Structure formats: structure tokens, C-alpha cells
Amino acid sequence: MKNILAFGASSSLNSINKQFAKYSSDQIPSSKTNLLDLNDFEMPIFSIDKQKESGIPDEAKNFKNYIYNSDAIIISFAEHNGSYTSAFKNVLDWVSRIERIVWCGKPMLLLSASDGERGAKLVLETAFNRIKRENTETLFKFSLKNFHSTFDLEKGILDAQLNKMYRSVLADFINVI
């Protein structure tokens, strides 16, 4: 059985990206999911001074342990002002101090979702370009636009063309895990 680490890169309590990450992890046969909430990993805003003063927070170490113990990772990105949410960026900054190769070369499915027509593509491209520096063979991406009109928690992606594209990316991801 494969261990899937999944989370929405948002601190919103009702994050559509957390919903999309969970839905996607549920599509993987013979797997179990560790669905994380970034709110469980709140830490001081990263600075080298804070690290020198107090060391690396336990929350960052715990997050890194989830990565180590997974077989694959699914992240669905929310876009704030064209970039990562501050909650995700802070976790990334702290975890990168533990080990430069943050994602341990695990197969990754990068997603984004928004209610807009672009589907948070800007942050998805930013994440993809950052992560591909350490993972070029097993990195996949998909963006879902107009979330509330194109997605249903029970039925999945309602738009036939988007669903076909999603299923293709998902199949490629499943094939490498």
C-alpha cells in the first residue's frame, strides 16, 4: 500500500485546494493518505536570526518526517497575489533549513485550483519551476479553473475536457508510484 502525503498549500479553513488535494489522493488505488492541514504547522516567520536563536521548530521537523515517510506527494496550491500563500512559503523556508532537497525526490502531483478563469496557474508554474530543480522525472501538474462551477466533491471534475486532461495527468502520476 502506497503512503500519499496530501495537502492544500493554504491556511484557509475551507480551502478548495485542500479539498482538491484530498479528492486527488482518493483517486489513487491501493493507497492511504496523510492529509495535512498547514494550520498544524504554524511557526514563527522564518529568519536566520530566529533559527540561530531558537533552532528549527519541531513543526518543521514533523513536516519533514511526513515527507520522509511518504511514497508520493500531492500539493494543491492556492494563489495569493500571484504567488505561494505565506503559510506555505513559511513551512517551505523552515523545512529547507533541515535539508536542501525538501521533497526527497518523491513523485509529486502539483495542482492548483481557484474560482477564476486562470485556475491559479501562476503559482502552479512557480511551484513547478522551483520543484523541478530537484525532481525532473516524476513531477506532474494540473490546474483547475472555476472551481465551484467545475468541481463537485462527490462527482469530481464536471467539465468533460478538464476531466480528461486531469485523468491523463493523474494516470501518469499513478504509473510512477
Image (cartoon, helix red, strand yellow):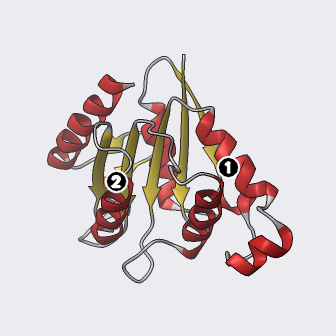
Q: Amino acid at mark 1?
A: Phe
Residue 167 or residue 115, whichever sits in front: 167
- Residue drawn at the location 47% of the way across and 36% of the way down: 25
Measured along the vertical axis of the image, is residue 146 above or below residue 3? below
At mark 1, the secondary structure is helix
Q: Is residue 161 left or right of residue 22?
A: left
Residue projecting furthest to the left: 161
Residue 133's disc number: 2
Residue 94's disc number: none
Q: Is residue 54 left or right of residue 59?
A: right
Q: Residues within 10 Å of mark 2 (few under 14, many from 20)?
A: few
Q: Residues within 10 Å of mark 1 (few under 14, many from 20)?
A: some
Q: If the image is split into quadrants, where does the C terminus sit?
A: top left
At mark 2, the secondary structure is loop
Residue 4 location (% of width, % of height): 53, 33
Residue placed under numbered mark 1 in the picture: 63
Measured along the vertical axis of the image, is residue 123 above or below residue 28? below
Residue 47 or residue 168, whichever sits in front: 47
Dot placed on the residue nearer the N-terminal end, 1 or 2:
1
In which quarter of the view is residue 139 placed?
A: top left
Check if mark 1's residue and mark 2's residue have beta carbons within 8 Å. no
Residue projecting furthest to the bottom: 81
- Residue drawn at the location 49% of the way across and 17% of the way down: 30
Q: Amino acid at mark 2?
A: Arg
